[in-house]
Structure formats: C-alpha cells, structure tokens
Amino acid sequence: MPFYQVLCIAAHNREYRQIKSLVRLAAMHILNGGGVVRGIQYQGTESLPQRMRSHGTNHEHGDYWTMHFDASPEKQKGLSKLLRNDPRVIRATVLKMGERIEDVAWKYPKTIIPARDIPDVP
C-alpha cells in the first residue's frame, strides 16, 4: 500500500466539533477501507494567504490539519472526492509520499559530530 499525506484547510468555526468530525470522517474512511492512519496533526487556525471561495462562501481564516496514512489508490481517490464535496473543506490535497517504507524512511544514519571536529568557517 502506498503512503500518503493529506493536507487540508477547513472552514474556521469557533466550535471545534466541526473540525473534529471532519477529521474523524476522513480517518474512518481510510480505516474502513483496510488502510492505516499513521498520524493526525492539527496546525491551528490561521489567516488565509488570500480570500478563498469554496462551496459558495468566501473564507478569510482556516483550520489547517494533516493526516499521514497508508491506503489503496482507490481509497485515496475516494478520500479526495469525499473532502472535495464536503462544505466544511476549503482546500485539500493528497500527496503520495512513497510506495514502500524505504521510500519515506531516513536513508542515512543519524550521527552526532563532536564540536571539535567541525571546521571553522571564516
């Protein structure tokens, strides 16, 4: 199963029940299709870079969130369609991170260089 990341801007609402139900809907769509949700991260409410129009409404603020998941390509397309048709979503995009774990894992060992071995830069 490919590894994906969905980036979503949801319409801002004072009550966070709407964003919670939207994230839950997206996660359950993946889980019910046999996929795996690896992580969900809420990045907060921010002003949009420009006024955006979605589902007949202009928006100036949005709630940003991301979700990492493994799913079949059919489920990924279904999630894109689900988010595109939801009136709570301003913008959403799905990025394919890789096919295998080797594609997204850190390829080089993490080492710590002692400070005495770092050359001075003039």
Image (spheres, rainbow, N blue to C red):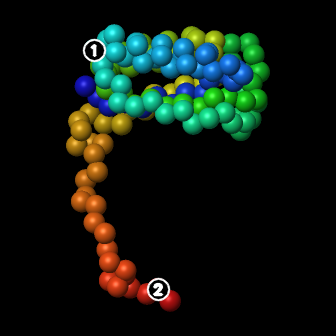
48 to the left or right of 1: right
- In 3D space, how far apart are the residues under numbered discs 1 and 2 (Cα atoms)? 53 Å
The picture quadrant where one finds residue 99 is top left
- Which residue is at 36% across, 25% downward? 37
Labelled disc at residue 121: 2
* Quadrant in which the N terminus is drawn: top left
User: Which residue is painted at 25% across and 58% down in the image?
Assistant: 108
What's the residue type where badge 1 is placed? Answer: Gly
Can residue 77 be seen here? The reply is: no
Label count reads 2
In front: 13, or 77?
Answer: 13
The residue pinned by badge 1 equals 34
Density class for disc 2 (Cα within 10 Å; few <14, some 14-19, many ≥20) is: few
87 lies above or below 97? above
For badge 2, the amino acid type reads Val
- Please tell me whether mark 1 sits on a helix, a strand or a loop: loop
